[in-house]
Image (cartoon, rainbow, N blue to C red):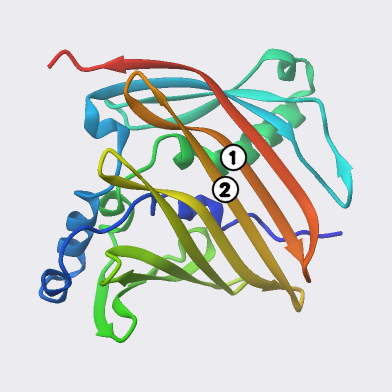
Amino acid sequence: MKRPRRIFQFWVFVLLVCCSCPPSALAQKNSNQILRKLDSAYYYPQRNGLTGLIATVVWEKGGFGGKNYEANPSVKFSWNSVSDSRTFKVTGQSLKVPDEEQNSLLHFFSNYKEVLLPQTLTEKFSRYSGKVSHGNFGTRINFEIDDFQDGVSRYSLFINDKQRNVSRMLIDRIEAPTKVTGVFKYIQKNEHWLVSESVARFNFSGQPHVEKTVYYYGQIENIWLVNRIVQTLSKEDKEISRFIFKVKDYLLNWSNN
């Protein structure tokens, strides 16, 4: 059975926290100004003196069509502030599998790189021109993607002015699923916000799908980092896959300032 490409989780991690600026301020700003204001309220570990990070990501459970894979493959994730690169490397027992399977494993985990160390909204969207509009829903920013990067033609961010957060996101795509709607729940850490749950809804092959992802965080050396991810995919209200990932063995590097 052909399954939908897991396109939503790659983008949800840019929306890790809430907006803290007042509604009147949002109404007077262009898209770049709004993004910078949003970023000032987001929880970014790299803005707390962190210059490098290494962690082990273990695939605890996953499968499709009722079949689970219990081999517990693992990869090493690394990031440094100089290159701002986020990379994965096969490690542990996963080194014993054929190269083709290792490459598939790395490709799969690449969808989750922004969970561990998110980019800012400004970094993610500054190359695109955003159009700001206002209505009963609050503030909306549409980003038209002329080069169709990752098959996307438009991102629409909806900012709930009263709640002061990004309440949902619409993704328009040039290939199936052509429309993805995501909504978010939040938790607060150090007076900033992190996404605790995301729910994406889309149609694939004419059938409704729901992808739900729950994020759990722990404090490592006074920095809040994700330590567990539970993700389910349902079709017509029936669960067809479940993935559980554990993030452990964090090693952090700090600036000398």
Q: Badge 1, how many Cα within 10 Å: few under 14, some, many 20+?
A: many
Type of the residue with mark 2: Val
Quadrant where the N terminus lies? bottom right
Q: Mark 2 and 1 residues: CB-CB less than 8 Å, in contact?
A: yes
- Give the answer, above or below, for where 212 lies relative to 161: above
| Horizontal side of residue 40 vs 195, given as left or right | left
CA distance for labels 2 and 1: 6 Å
The quadrant holding residue 96 is top right
Q: Which mark is residue 214?
A: 2
- Give the answer, above or below, for where 137 lies relative to 101: below
Q: Secondary structure at mark 2?
A: strand
Q: Secondary structure at mark 1?
A: strand
Position of residue 224 measured from the top left corner of the image (x, y, whole percent): 38, 31
Upstream in sequence: badge 2 or badge 1: 2
Residue drawn at (32%, 71%), measured in percent from left and top?
Answer: 160
How many badges with numbers are in the image? 2
Position of residue 172 measured from the top left corner of the image (x, y, whole percent): 50, 73
Front-lying residue, 173 or 204: 204
Position of residue 209 measured from the top left corner of the image (x, y, whole percent): 70, 68
| Horizontal side of residue 12 vs 134, given as left or right | right
- Identify the residue under disc 1: 229
Residue drawn at (64%, 59%), measured in percent from left and top?
Answer: 211
| Horizontal side of residue 74 vs 31, given as left or right | right
- Give the answer, above or below, for where 88 lies relative to 151: above
Residue drawn at (51%, 51%), measured in percent from left and top?
Answer: 10
Residue drawn at (42%, 65%), measured in percent from left and top?
Answer: 147
